[in-house]
Image (tube, rainbow, N blue to C red):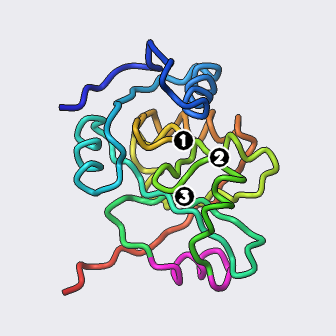
């Protein structure tokens, strides 16, 4: 059973520097957050267990780029919503979006696959990545995400995300309305 704890870990000895940087960033802003430590979240079953422990839905975070690999996007959307690139491409007026290479993820956000999170934008000091948020995320009270690693998850209020965290990262965000698709047979 996963245990929900308030704030940063008491012992940070075996934690990666990028995870500690996330806690430092949130603490500096005075953000109230909860945390749960877990095995690497690589399956939906693990994610569902984390969701139950956090009592918040961890959103799906996708790192995308245009065909020329000159524009990069971090999309936050509900985990239970099916993603189709054509829908986002149409909303943003960008043709041929695809998943960006791992090297760009590491270069701009200092994160690796499986750890994609809005918190990675604190490392995007060159502002190369455009944040895109599905409107359903903004309708919730709390949001769950990784602290730049996938062996812990944190939750904080959506209001703190929009009013404090994103502005402190010196980023803006674009709100999109991606459609929900019925389950396909």
The range drawn in magenta is: 84-96
Going 66% across and 61% down the picture, which residue do you hit?
103
List the residue tagged with mark 2. 110
Q: Earlier in the sequence, mark 2 or mark 3?
A: 2
Give the numbered dot on residue 103: none
Residue at 60% of width from left, 62% of height from top? 102
For marks 2 and 3, give the CA distance. 20 Å
Residue wearing tag 1: 148
* Residue 123, image x, y percentages: 70, 42
Tell me: 27 left or right of 37: right
Q: Is residue 181 above or below residue 121?
A: below
Among the two numbered marks 1 and 3 on one chain, the one whose residue lies closer to the N terminus: 3
**Which image quadrant: the N terminus?**
top left
Q: Which residue is mark 3?
A: 133
Marks 2/1 in contact by CB < 8 Å: the verdict is yes
In this rendering, would 109 be left or right of 113? right
């Amino acid at each position: 059973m996963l245990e929900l704890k308030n704030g940063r870990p008491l012992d940070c000895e075996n934690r990666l520097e990028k995870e500690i940087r996330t806690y430092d960033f949130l603490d500096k802003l005075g953000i109230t957050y909860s945390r749960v430590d877990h095995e690497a979240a690589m399956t939906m079953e693990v994610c569902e267990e984390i969701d139950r422990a956090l009592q918040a839905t961890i959103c799906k975070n996708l790192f995308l780029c245009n065909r020329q690999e000159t524009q990069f996007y971090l999309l936050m959307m509900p985990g239970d919503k099916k993603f189709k690139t054509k829908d986002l491409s149409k909303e943003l007026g960008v043709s041929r979006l695809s998943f960006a290479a791992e090297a760009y993820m590491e270069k701009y956000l200092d994160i690796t696959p499986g750890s994609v999170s809005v918190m990675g934008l604190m490392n995007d000091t060159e502002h190369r990545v455009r944040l895109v948020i599905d409107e359903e995320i903004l309708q919730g009270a709390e949001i769950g995400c990784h602290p730049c690693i996938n062996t812990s998850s944190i939750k904080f209020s959506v209001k703190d995300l929009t009013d404090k965290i994103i502005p402190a990262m010196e980023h803006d965000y674009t709100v999109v309305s991606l459609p929900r698709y019925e389950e396909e047979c």
